[in-house]
Image (tube, rainbow, N blue to C red):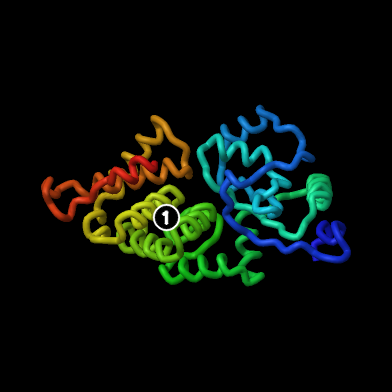
Amino acid sequence: MNSTLSMISTEKTPNQRIASIPLAKIEPGDYQRPTNARQVANIVKNFDEAKLGALTVSERGGMYRLIDGAHRSCALRTLGYTHALCVVLTGLTYEQEAEYFRKQNQDKRPLAPADLFKAGLASGDEQCANINRIVRANGFNIGTGRKDFYRLMSFYALYTISEEFGYKVLDDTLFLIANTWHGIAKASQSECLLGVAEFVSRYGITEFAERMHEKFAVVWYDYCEAMRVHGSVGSAASRKKFCRILVQHYNKGLVHNSKKRLKWETDHENRD
């Protein structure tokens, strides 16, 4: 048993799980230290998703009370993220949350997302198990280290796709990437995973592999140019930008009245 948790209560150990939580539902506790704007700006300037770690929240009263990660959550909002990977505790009172915050910040080394995912698999977490099953079924694996096509390292993307779009879209996304851009390392990075998932959620997998097979380089170039002008990698806006670029290149070569052409629908446009 975690020694920090055991100090909170000798009668009941809080349950905990790993989940991608909407930032809009996360509220800081008033026992938190004041947020340092300079520290937030520094996180934004040097942002690295792989080093972000997970926030710690307590699920209570229909909301998620932020116990640890105030500066990181502010940075994520600044960058346009809508969700954050969190360790979610349940069963804590307000007083226990404050005590957890005190103990957590005395001497801590945040777990990396890879460690959290590994622990989730070992604990039998259903979401971790489903993601791992889908990833492996499509010929990929989950891990860290040297970037290559087969190694998926964006835990944020995997959690976001499974929670916002569902496991079917995650499966179709990995299937399309594996069969369209096999071996291209950038094609299995976070930006592409999220952008293709957005495409699949809107249009399905219709003729994607056939029409997009030779187009990754130009899609990636156009996306990078669009993000260079304005955008935050990993945000909802950036994945929709990637999706729109996919649609543009999917339609190239099709006559204007072709039934195969995809439309960037007005209802999506307004919603975006």
51 displayed left or right of 7: left
Q: How many marks?
A: 1
151 displayed left or right of 113: left
Toward the front, the furthest residue is: 61
Residue at x 12%, y 52% (from the top left corner)? 258
Which residue type does callout 1 highlight? Ser
Residue 165 higher or lower than 108, as above or below? below
Residue 261 x, y percent position in the rendering: 19, 51
Residue at x 46%, y 50% (from the top left corner)? 190
Residue 124 x, y percent position in the rendering: 63, 72
Residue at x 70%, y 50% (from the top left corner)? 110
Residue 122 higher or lower than 19, as above or below? below
Residue 146 shows in this picture: no
Q: Identify residue for label 1.
A: 188
SS for tag 1?
Answer: helix
Could you say which quadrant of the image residue 180 lies in? bottom left
Residue 25 x, y percent position in the rendering: 60, 47
Residue 230 x, y percent position in the rendering: 41, 31
Residue at x 80%, y 66% (from the top left corner)? 1
Instruction: Judge by depth and name the residue closer to the eye, 30 or 41.
Output: 30
Residue 33 shows in this picture: yes
Dot 1 crowding, Cα within 10 Å, few <14, some 14–19, many 20+: many
Could you say which quadrant of the image residue 89 lies in? bottom right
Instruction: Judge by depth and name the residue closer to the eye, 90 or 78.
Output: 90
Assign the C terminus to one quadrant of the image: top left
68 displayed left or right of 79: right
